[in-house]
Amino acid sequence: MSAPSPSLLSAAADAARHQDHPPSTLYMVATPIGNLADIGLRALYVLSMVDTVACEDTRHTGTLLGSYGLHKPLLAVHEHNEAEAAQAVVQRLQRGERVAYVSDAGTPGVSDPGARLVAAVQAAGLRCVPLPGPSSITALLSVAGETGWDGRFVFQGFLSSRKAERQRQIQDMAADGRAHLLLEAPHRIEALAQDLAALGDRGISLGRELTKQFEEVVRLPAKDLPDWLAGGPHRARGEFALMVHPAAASANEGLDATTLRTLDVLLAELPLKTAVKLCADITGQPRNAVYQAALARRGEDSVSD
């Protein structure tokens, strides 16, 4: 991508000028996850106006900023030095500087460095401002089709690199009827796929190289994921986002008598969704299963995966 024209930077300034961007503030800026065209106008404006850009990788961020015709002093703040480097950022903010923080891709602080930096800045009584933007999580969710009756999901991020712990985490997902969002790197995707296969027929949506030229989004049963990856060497390349779809629950499946009695009492007094939420909160049962049971008890159509 060539450097933006002055008219684009002017448009960015016009779009963002109505909002105050005060000094002594840390700006958490989301950056493209692969497609440079996904940068936001406000992100361009803030990156052009800050005094310093703190970043996960100075070489990567220097190249990224150069793609937009921007050149700023860079300060490395990554997972290995975040606690110490955060103090350098705090000192700059205390001098009245504006500092932006970017990770290598997507939203900083979400499965990326940035959380400790924010905590240090807030502990110093200074302000942090979020600039939302590209995210592999929401990108995959938008094309996954559904996340369950109430649209809720659990963000798991990267599972453990230790096989036994990773398998335990997947067992927990198997017992939880909600949707689960995962991230994975190319050198670990095959091991993850082998472990996810234990979920059997439960649906998986996989997004590979999201927003890039060779983007792929597929949906298939968990048991078929290893074979899909083995279908070509290119399929194990790139960064991955995965959604474990909600479990298909037949009415009353897995619900004990106490849960069903609680549900009946609540349904007699409350709207269906309120009764389901309270019953799940009280009993600890998966909301999807409680909802299916509630529909059956009211004689309505069941919802399945």
Image (cartoon, grey):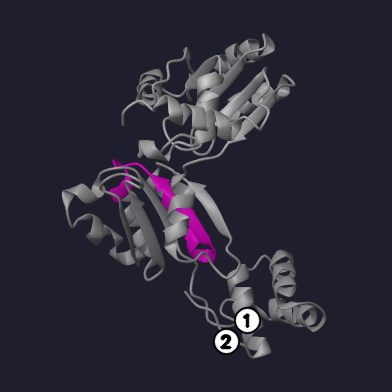
The picture places residue 303, in percent across and down from the top left corner, at 54, 79
Please tell me whether mark 2 sits on a helix, a strand or a loop. Answer: loop
Residue 283 showing in the rendered view: yes
Q: Which residues are magenta?
A: 165-190
Residue 62 position in % (x across, y down): 38, 19
Instruction: Say whether residue 194 is left or right of residue 50.
Output: left
Residue 275 is situated, as x and y percent measured from the top left of the image, at 74, 74
Q: Residue at x 66, y 32 (%)?
A: 19
Q: Residue furthest left?
A: 232
Q: CA gap, disc 2 to disc 1?
A: 11 Å
The mark that comes first in sequence, 2 or 1, is: 1
Disc 2 or disc 1, which is closer to the eye? 2
Residue at 48%, 34% (x, y): give it: 112
Name the amino acid type tagged 2.
Asp
Residue 175 part of the magenta-drawn span: yes
Q: What residue sits right under mark 2 in the picture?
A: 301
> Is-magenta flag for residue 67?
no
Q: Amino acid at mark 1?
A: Ala
> Quick one: 108 or 158, which is closer to the camera?
108
In this view, 241 is above or below 278: above
Q: Is residue 33 visible?
A: no
Instruction: Name the residue carrying label 1.
Output: 293
- Identify which residue is drawn at 52% across, 39% down: 110
Q: Residues within 10 Å of mark 1 (few under 14, many from 20)?
A: many
Q: Residue furthest bottom?
A: 299
Question: Which image quarter: residue 150?
Answer: bottom right
Q: Residue furthest front?
A: 7
